[in-house]
Amino acid sequence: MAEENKGFFKGLFGKLGLGKETPPEPEVEKKTGAQEPVETQSASDWARELFQKMEEPAAPEKAPAPTAAEAVAPAAAPPGAPTAPAEPVVPVAPVEPSAPVAPAAVTPPPQAAVVEQAKPSFFERLKRSLSKTHESIVGRMDALLLGKKQIDTDTLEELEEILITADIGVKTTVDLVRTLEQRLKRAELQDGAALKQALKEEILVRLEANSAPLVVTDKKPFVILVIGVNGVGKTTTIGKLAARYAGEGKRVLLAAADTFRAAAAEQLETWAGRVGAEIVRHKEGADPSAVVFDACKAAAARGCDVLIIDTAGRMHTKVNLMEEMKKIRRVLTREIPDAPHETLLVLDAATGQNALSQAKLFKEAADVSGVVLTKLDGSAKGGIVVAVSHEYALPVRFIGVGEAVEDLREFDPAQFVEALFQ
Ligand SMILES: Nc1nc2c(ncn2[C@@H]2O[C@H](COP(=O)(O)OP(=O)(O)O)[C@@H](O)[C@H]2O)c(=O)[nH]1
Ligand SMILES: [Mg+2]
């Protein structure tokens, strides 16, 4: 900054009664954790602090600890600040210029720990999410068993009705009740508690029979094709998955092959930005296969670990669906011979029997290898998890219990059954 400007600001300091104060030591800036090299405190820095003071007459006495991001990111210049300075403005705590400023600025932000503590565990959230399903299965079962001295075939018939209306599915319910009848004959079901325990065990056995986590191998890239009808939560699930894999240090590329609406690609782009993934997108209305082709090329060129493909959910008929799938797969396998390594069907648990019909349609048309059940939170139709898994022999890979990143969890049958029955 030119000497005459320095003089001008010193004059201003005088008017504000700050003339005698010396500029803060350069050390102060280093302690803020800012990445920019700081040499000496120039007059421009000093003036900037002054402007900041003028802008914040009601600044709190104690400087709030900056968040981790604020501590490293260059802060925006305060409104009205001189535009001349070339260096980015480092965060400056609003304290007396001569005071030893830094300690508050280098203290790690306490928020994360507080939030972590305040948040209920995933099991608690799962339990809460399943409370309506619990009511629809266990609550009604409790009412049925109330005052019953012994369990008989009539009791099991009534239980059958409860299970069918709780979206466990006809086939699975019939199978469950048949097994319970055998256990009744073996005198294993002495009372209501024993029946409840037996049902819990039998549901778990069926869930475990088809359960397997999604293992992302070291194929480069490991390709996940995400399918399902509109609105079930595909894009959101992809965002959450991308966060998970990026968090494991994997390089993740998202392909916006839902080109039906521009908003779909924008939504995916927002997720990519949030979670640190890359994205390939085309214009609205583009051929989804062209997006897939470009994404395969980009993933190979950039050495991506995981490629996740978002698709449109507008295939209303099986013929349409099959054609669209065939086309995408044809392009995929031409570029990456054994891809997709996982075809993930997303189903909205809140839609109950509709979700079951979708599972049937997609299984026949699209070679589904795993399922994600979203929106279990608040749904009374969580029994669908059992039906999908048992009736269609499809492994449930993940469940969604909310819209936040941490609300997508690997499906754990034992935990699920425990949360359902508790
Ligand atoms: N409550 C809840 N909402 C969800 C969950 N998963 C997705 N959603 C919401 O469902 C809506 C549709 O999701 P989107 O990903 O756009 O569906 P898509 O059309 O299949 O891509 C969005 O508002 C999501 O935030 C979930 O597990 N729980
Ligand atoms: Mg979408």
Image (spheres, rainbow, N blue to C red):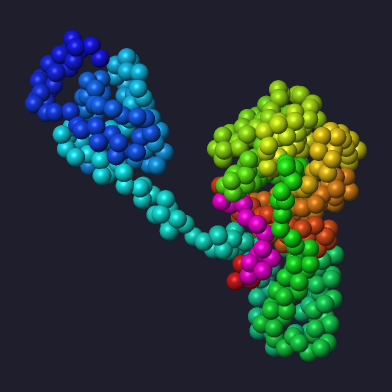
Task: Name the quadrant containing residue 319.
Answer: top right
Residue 224, position as x, y percentages in the image: 74, 44
Q: Residue at x 12, y 16 (%)?
A: 11
Q: Which residue, as the protein is rendered here, is positioned at the far front? A: 39
Q: Quadrant of the N terminus?
A: top left
Q: Is residue 67 left or right of residue 214?
A: left
Residue 184, position as x, y percentages in the image: 80, 85
Q: Is residue 403 left or right of residue 168?
A: left
Q: Residue at x 18, y 10 (%)?
A: 4
Task: Name the quadrant containing residue 287.
Answer: top right
Q: Is residue 60 left or right of residue 332?
A: left
Q: Nearer the viewer, residue 371 or 254?
A: 254
Residue stretch rendered in magenta on the structure: 406-418
Task: Name the quadrant containing residue 155.
Answer: bottom right
Q: Residue at x 36, y 47 (%)?
A: 109
Residue 114, position as x, y percentages in the image: 39, 54
Q: Is residue 290 above or below residue 8?
A: below
**Residue 225 can be seen in this image:** yes
Q: Nearer the viewer, residue 327 or 97?
A: 97
Q: Which residue, as the protein is rendered here, is positioned at the far top? A: 4
Q: Which residue, as the protein is rendered here, is positioned at the far right? A: 319
